[in-house]
Image: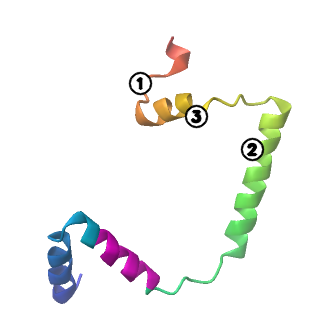
């Protein structure tokens, strides 16, 4: 990171949280999005369709959000261990 960028970063990190959020949003809005990656879009679409079919056929079992959230944030709370 260039020295001026590092200095700006340190100054930005010293701002209150709401000011950092506003600054981050403004910086993100100033960046042009890159071109869409058609292969990635196609791959994600195929993956979503595959997963949906697994749920529809019963190959995988869906869990309620509350349980999924517990598993995400507390992986030691695995229902298989109960």
Q: Is residue 7 magenta?
A: no
Callout 3: SS: helix
Helix, strand or loop for disc 1: loop
Give the mark nearest the N terminus, 3 or 2.
2
Query: In the image, 27: left or right of 70?
Result: left
Percent of width and height locating residue 32: 51, 87
* Contact check, label 3 and label 1, Cβ < 8 Å: no
Residue found 43% across the figure and 87% down from its top: 30
Looking at the image, which residue sits at the far front?
A: 18
State the separation of the CA atoms marked 3 and 2: 17 Å
Q: What element carries label 2?
A: helix
Q: Pointer 2: residues within 10 angstroms few (<14), some, or many (20+)?
A: some
Look at 21% across and 77% down and name the residue there.
9
**Principal secondary structure, stretch drawn in magenta:** helix
Start-end of magenta stretch? 20-29
Q: Which mark is residue 65?
A: 3
- In the image, is residue 7 above or below residue 72? below
Residue 29 percent coordinates (x, y): 45, 82
Q: Which of marks 3 and 1 is nearer the N terminus?
A: 3
Residue receiving disc 1: 76
Which residue bears the numbered disc 2? 51
Work out whether mark 1 precedes mark 2 in sequence or the reverse, and give the earlier one: 2
């Amino acid at each position: 990171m260039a020295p001026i960028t590092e200095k700006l970063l340190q100054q930005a990190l010293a701002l209150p949280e709401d000011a950092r959020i506003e600054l981050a949003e403004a910086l993100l809005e100033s960046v042009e999005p890159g071109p869409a990656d058609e292969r990635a879009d196609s791959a994600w679409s195929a993956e979503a369709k595959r997963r949906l079919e697994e749920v529809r056929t019963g190959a995988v079992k869906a869990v309620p959000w509350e349980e999924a959230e517990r598993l995400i944030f507390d992986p030691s709370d695995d229902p298989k261990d109960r």
